[in-house]
Amino acid sequence: MAPQRKLAAGNWKMNGLSGQLSEIDALVGSHADAGCEILICPPATLIAPMADRADGRIAVGGQDCHAEAKGAHTGDLSAAMLKDAGATYVITGHSERRADHGESDAVVRAKTEAAWEAGLAAIVCIGETLDQREADETIAVIDAQLGGSIPDGATGENLVIAYEPVWAIGTGKVPTIDQIAEVHDHIRKTLADRFGEGTAQDVRLLYGGSVKPDNAKEIFAVDNVDGALVGGASLKAADFGGIIEALDG
Ligand code: 13P
């Protein structure tokens, strides 16, 4: 497989009405020829119009999907529906879903399998809470989440992993470079043990949690960081553009 392009992914969370699609026009206008791959995961209501406007120049993804392909699940969306609307990726196991909706590793694994079944690449999120870090449990938590959330059959094309320490999300706090390096090295080694060295190198490992244009360069210089999953700073094309430029080096 050809080496994967680095990935600048934006997670808009529960932000964005149709008026904000102008940010996508701006992003496409300024960064369509970026060296890295660009992905925005808007609220589900904006996937179709965003994919339409992006026209393949940037990728569009969902923020969650149901584990089943269809059925009596009022309010939920299947991976095939996201794909049908124009998504090529879906985030699974974001810490906000794990916390707000009680999603276990087994649920995240089932959702990831459903994503693959529908032909979407999954961005599986893992990361420790502050209490877990302070109790020196970070690596144990990462191991449990990796083992429990990632199905068999992972490849560099169907899987991206985002390391998002819960305490760094939306707080302006960022782990030290050494802390990011330790976790990303560990994820790469764990993937190699389970899926083989080639697959482990192909799966892109994103860092997420308070990534901004002014700290992105330092984070992207860390070994085994292949991009970022960005919340707040992905909402404005100007901010996200700065992160894309840092990733392109
Ligand atoms: P922030 O970049 O706003 O900290 O959010 C990170 C995140 O949760 C992306 O999924």
Image: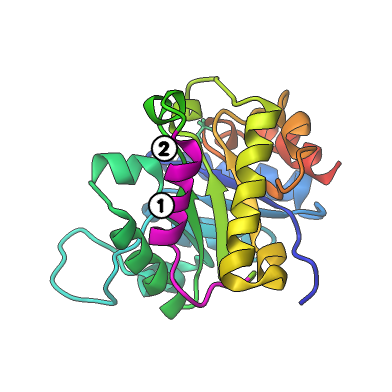
Which quadrant would the N terminus be assigned to in this image?
bottom right
For the point 64% across and 35% down, the residue is 180
Dot 2 or dot 1: first in sequence order is 2
> Does residue 42 appear anywhere in the picture?
yes
**Residue 73, horizontal then vertical, whole percent:** 16, 66
**Residue 122, horizontal then vertical, whole percent:** 49, 63
Mark 2 and 1 residues: CB-CB less than 8 Å, in contact?
A: no
For the point 29% across and 65% down, the residue is 66
Amino acid carrying mark 1 in the image: Ala
Q: Residue furthest right?
A: 249
> Does residue 49 appear anywhere in the picture?
no
**Residue 117, horizontal then vertical, whole percent:** 42, 79
**Disc 1 secondary structure class:** helix
Q: Is residue 237 above or below residue 210?
A: below
Which residue is the site of mark 1? 144
Residues drawn in magenta: 137-155
Residue 100 occupies quadrant? top left
